[in-house]
Image (tube, rainbow, N blue to C red):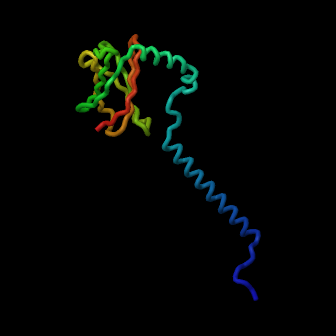
């Protein structure tokens, strides 16, 4: 009596192996293509050199900490407001603040900012370049006094 299953022959094994590797290679190629299209690569330019100069960054942060300055961030009527105060709570005038809004998932949506001093210690900039959602603000004083700040914020 003959069984219902035919014996496995050499070409059956070859077809199964080719199908297995064909599916595996196709899925890998799809995932690689998706990864390259959705993530542009290195987010920090020249990260190796930044690592080499990390002690300089620490020195700047220690100098800023010695000042005791604090910054508060608000968003009012499409304007980003940064209020800087010294250790005694007095406003800090005359800073040349520049900055950037960084989108957490898409570096192509990042935008640069140039703050204007609205009144003593209060710096403002319109945020028309950014859509609503979560953003990361980084502002730096371009003047003589070292001051940097970072703040996560939600734009309505």
- Would you identify the image quadrant in which residue 72 lies? top left
> Residue shown at 36%/38% (left/top)?
134
Compared across the picture, whether 15 is left or right of 132 comes to right
Q: Position of residue 47 (x, y in %)?
A: 54, 27
Compared across the picture, whether 43 is left or right of 153 comes to right
- Would you identify the image quadrant in which residue 140 lies? top left
Note whether 154 is above or below 64 in the view shown. Answer: below
Q: Where is residue 103 in the image (x, y as percent from the top left)?
A: 40, 36
Compared across the picture, whether 134 is left or right of 34 comes to left
> Residue shown at 50%/19% (left/top)?
58
> Residue shown at 35%/21% (left/top)?
70
- Would you identify the image quadrant in which residue 86 lies? top left
User: Along the line of sight, which residue is nearer the eye, 58 or 78?
Assistant: 58
Which quarter shows the C terminus?
top left
- Residue reaching furthest to the top: 144
Q: Position of residue 154 (x, y in %)?
A: 33, 36
User: Along the line of sight, which residue is nearer the eye, 30 or 142?
Assistant: 142
């Amino acid at each position: 009596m003959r069984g219902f299953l035919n014996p496995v022959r050499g070409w059956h094994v070859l077809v199964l192996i080719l199908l297995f590797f064909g599916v595996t290679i196709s899925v890998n190629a799809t995932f690689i293509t998706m990864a390259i299209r959705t993530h542009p690569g290195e987010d920090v330019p020249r990260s190796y050199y930044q690592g080499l100069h990390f002690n300089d960054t620490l020195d700047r942060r220690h100098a800023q900490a010695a000042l005791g300055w604090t910054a508060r961030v608000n968003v009012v009527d499409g304007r980003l407001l940064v209020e800087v105060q010294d250790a005694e709570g007095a406003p800090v005038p005359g800073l040349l603040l520049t900055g950037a809004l960084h989108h957490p998932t898409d570096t192509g949506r990042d935008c640069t900012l140039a703050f204007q001093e609205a009144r003593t210690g209060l710096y403002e900039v319109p945020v028309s370049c950014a859509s609503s959602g979560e953003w990361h603000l980084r502002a730096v004083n371009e003047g003589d006094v070292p001051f940097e700040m970072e703040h996560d914020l939600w734009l309505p």
